[in-house]
Structures are given as structure tokens and as C-alpha cells.
Image (cartoon, rainbow, N blue to C red):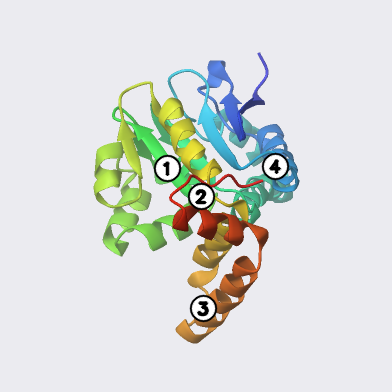
Amino acid sequence: MAAELLQSRAGQTLVLTLSDPEHRNALGPGIYAAGQDALTMAAGDAGIRSVVITGAGDVFSAGGKLQRLLANRAAEPDVQAHSIEGLHQWIRAIARCPKPVIAAVDGAAAGAGFSLALACDLLVAAEDAVMIMAYSTIALSPDGGASWSLAHLVPRQLATELLMCGTRISAQRLHELGVVNQVVAKGSALTAALALAGRLNARAPNALSSIKSLIRQAGGRDLNQQLDQEREHFVNNLHHANAGIGIDAFLNKTTPTYP
């Protein structure tokens, strides 16, 4: 069975499922392109309020397929560079998407699979989930934003250990570090991620889009620049119709419904 990125809808949530059972949901150029297309579609569809990325079966993703990497070694370097750029465009698409993107991790997330999970806005993992940056084990360096994500999310020494030593790290340890939002029972990561998505879907999408943008760009700005951006977003959102709905509902102790 060929690798594919399955798409389904759960209410206002788009679910993207990595599916390549024979190779533990390995990633490749076709998956990267499908992921970009799906997020571009989601960004423009008002009926989609959130996105969940998960893996088929009992594993999230084993990362890149070693057989493909061996074949690419025999080709010109541009072949592998083009492949990695496909992955990186998907990572960029997650960052650009105005909707929250949630990773639902059961089982293993290795290499680029771990990078993909870290690139999402929120991460839900099963208690048996194990994540590993296996690149150095096969004499490679990371891709998919792994070095950037880990450098921003965990202490430098731990990021160095994970990338240089290929140390496995549990969902519980990542939760203690604030990297994983929720640790849930084995086999229930998708269910929990959809519940989290439901909570987000009930909130004003314009406000969530602003929050995602502010958080994603904060690291590249100084305080004064960030304050300017917060002011701009706040004013725009105050004058959005949804602010009227939200404030009125709060004052009247009712549940708001945002179009």
C-alpha cells in the first residue's frame, strides 16, 4: 500500500493522518506536498477551525525512509536538497496557517516525525509515546526544524543530548518540560486532541489567529516591536464583530457562538 496523507473531518476540525503501515508511517515527498496542500486549503476554509495531525495505527511516524536516503546518496545532492525543502515547506505551512495545528502522537515519533510533532502549535501524546531524534545514529544532522524547535523549547544541554546522542525521551518527560500539553492513556491521543480542538473551535477564530501569529513571531522581535504588534492585533480584534459577541456573552453569562 502506497504512503498517503489521509484527510477527514471531525466537525470543524480537519484530521490529517500519516498512513504508510508497512514503513511505520514514514515520511516522504508525496506526504510533504499533500501536507502543504491540506494546510493551504484549511487556511482558506472558514468551516475549518483547527487541524490535527496524527498517525495511522499505533505509531505517529518513523521519520524518513532509509531506503530512499540510500538511493539519494547515489544521485546529485540537489535531489536530497529538493526533498528536504519539501519537508521544510510543510513545516513553514504549519507556522503560516492561521488555524491552530495539534499533533496527536501515539507510539513512536522519530527523526522527521518528531520534528513534525514539535512544529505543531500544541502536542498531545499517549503515555507510551516515545520520541527520538535518531539522525546522529546514522551519521546525519537534523532537518524539519528540529534544531530550532528544541533550542527554543528545552535547555541547550538537553537539546544537544537529544540531537547528538539520539536519546529517547518519553511523553511524560516532555510534559514536565512543557513541550507536551497533555499526556493521555495509550491509544487515546487522537481522541484527546479532537477534544482539545473542540475547545479551540468554540473560540473566535480571528483571536486565535492573532495569538498564533504573536507567539510565532515573538522570538524575532524585541519588546517594543512586540508591544506594537500586540496593540495592532488588539485594536483589530476589538473592532471585529466577534468581540461584540464575546463581550456581550460574558456580561450576560451566556455561551458565545462565533460564526
Q: Position of residue 43 (x, y in %)?
A: 70, 47
Nearer to us of marks 4 and 2 is: 4
Q: Which residue is mark 3?
A: 226
Q: Are marks 4 and 3 in contact (CB under 8 Å)?
A: no
Q: Please state which amino acid type lies under the numbered disc 2.
A: Ala
Packing grade of label 2 (10 A; few <14, some 14-19, many >=20) is many
Question: How far apart are the alpha carbons under marks 4 and 3?
Answer: 27 Å
Q: Residue at x 50, y 81 (%)?
A: 227
Q: If you read the primary sequence from the N terminus, does the residue marked by circle 1 or circle 3 appear first?
A: 1
Q: Is label 4 in a helix, a strand or a loop?
A: helix
- For the question of whether residue 72 can be seen, the reply is yes
Packing grade of label 4 (10 A; few <14, some 14-19, many >=20) is many
Judge by depth and name the residue closer to the eye, 133 or 204.
204
Q: Which mark is residue 205?
A: none
Q: Please state which amino acid type lies under the numbered disc 1.
A: Leu
Judge by depth and name the residue closer to the eye, 91 or 244.
244
Q: Is label 1 in a helix, a strand or a loop?
A: strand
Q: Position of residue 5 (x, y in %)?
A: 65, 28
Q: Position of residue 37 (x, y in %)?
A: 74, 40
Q: If you read the primary sequence from the N terminus, does the residue marked by circle 3 or circle 2 appear first?
A: 2
Q: Which mark is residue 42?
A: 4
- For the question of whether residue 113 can be seen, the reply is no
Looking at the rendering, which quadrant does residue 101 occupy? top right
Q: Position of residue 137 (x, y in %)?
A: 39, 41
Q: Which residue is mark 1?
A: 123
Packing grade of label 3 (10 A; few <14, some 14-19, many >=20) is some
Quarter of the picture containing the N terminus is: top right
